[in-house]
Image (tube, helix red, strand yellow):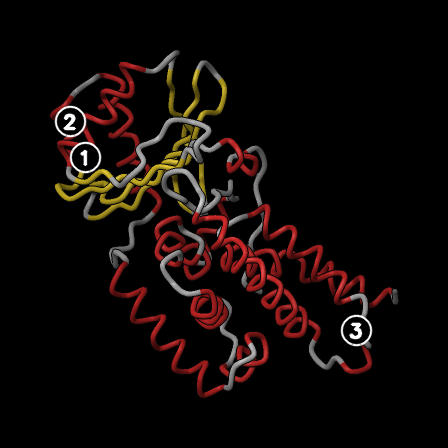
Amino acid sequence: MPRSATDAFVTHRNLLFTVAYEILGSAADAEDVLQESWLRWAEVDLDEVREPRAYLVRIATRQALNRLRSLERRKEDYVGQWLPEPLLTAPDIAEDVVLADSVSMALMVVLESLAPTERAVFVLRETFGFSHPEIAEAVDRSPAAVRQIAHRAREHVAARRLHHRTDAAEARRTLDAFTRSIETGDVQALMDVLAPDVVVLADGGGIKQAVPNAVRGADRVARLFLGGMSKAPGTLTARPTAVNGHPALAIDLDGELDGVFSAQIRDGRIAEIYYVRNPEKLSRLSSATVLTAR
């Protein structure tokens, strides 16, 4: 393998991981996509490659789409709700607003409702800024078809996501208020920090207990968390962390990581909660994952 090929792959490795992760919602599967992409890149005649970045993204996108279709079949047999795999991220990711927004748990959950090709087109266009002809080569569609798919995906996402952007300081204050209300058992304080129409999505993967369906409404959500605290088989504590570019809480049970709690904040209140307890999805929370759109 020529040294230049190795250099090109290493140079763009973080980008390729980010592309694959946004398409798949799984860091483990994104790593597999990188391995598969490297094997295919190793067979490419570099004399025919004008732009290594675009060519590598094309390879990674095709591998991610193949894996995503397989992942869709696995999700059909998944126990309970399926949430994206959370990633511990460095604080500087928040400086890139588009990237931080694109990997937020809130948007990643919405992307789960897109068809595979729609998701790939949306990610490549909205996060990474590839042109319609470039995306067409990656997803094996015509530029005109990609333009239609991109429009349809944008409308779908816009209709299903919250549009209020909260800064990190406000999000941290809201999560701190939530933590205090839970620790003190202050029902009124908890109700004050929850939006009336708050919804909880939880993922235990059939390995750890988690609500099998979405729980909606402040009263029901308050009972869920306060009841969970009282029934815990040990001491639960929450510590601040940063997940997918946004403030979050790492939940420890007797000092051991039990889950990660992230939320979508709207007007100073928690509107959506994503609680991942599946231990198979908690492996990327010990060290920060480098994500990039460049």
Q: Amino acid at mark 3?
A: Val
Indicate which disc residue 44 carries: 3
Residue 6, horizontal then vertical, whole percent: 80, 62
Q: Residue at x 52, y 58 (%)?
A: 68
Q: Which residue is mark 1?
A: 193
1 and 94: which is toward the camera: 1
Q: Amino acid at mark 2?
A: Ala
In the image, 173: left or right of 79? Answer: left
Mark 3 neighbour density, 10 Å: few (under 14) some (14–19) many (20 or more): few
Q: Residue at x 38, y 82 (%)?
A: 148
Q: Specify the quadrant that holds the C terminus.
A: bottom right
Q: Secondary structure at mark 1?
A: helix
Disc tally is 3
- 13 vs 124: above or below: above
* Marks 3, 1: nearer the viewer: 3
Disc nearer the start of the sequence (3/2): 3
- 201 vs 155: above or below: above
Q: Secondary structure at mark 3?
A: loop
Q: Amino acid at mark 1?
A: Val
Indicate which disc residue 189 carries: 2
- 24 vs 247: above or below: below
Q: Residue at x 82, y 77 (%)?
A: 45
Q: Secondary structure at mark 2?
A: helix
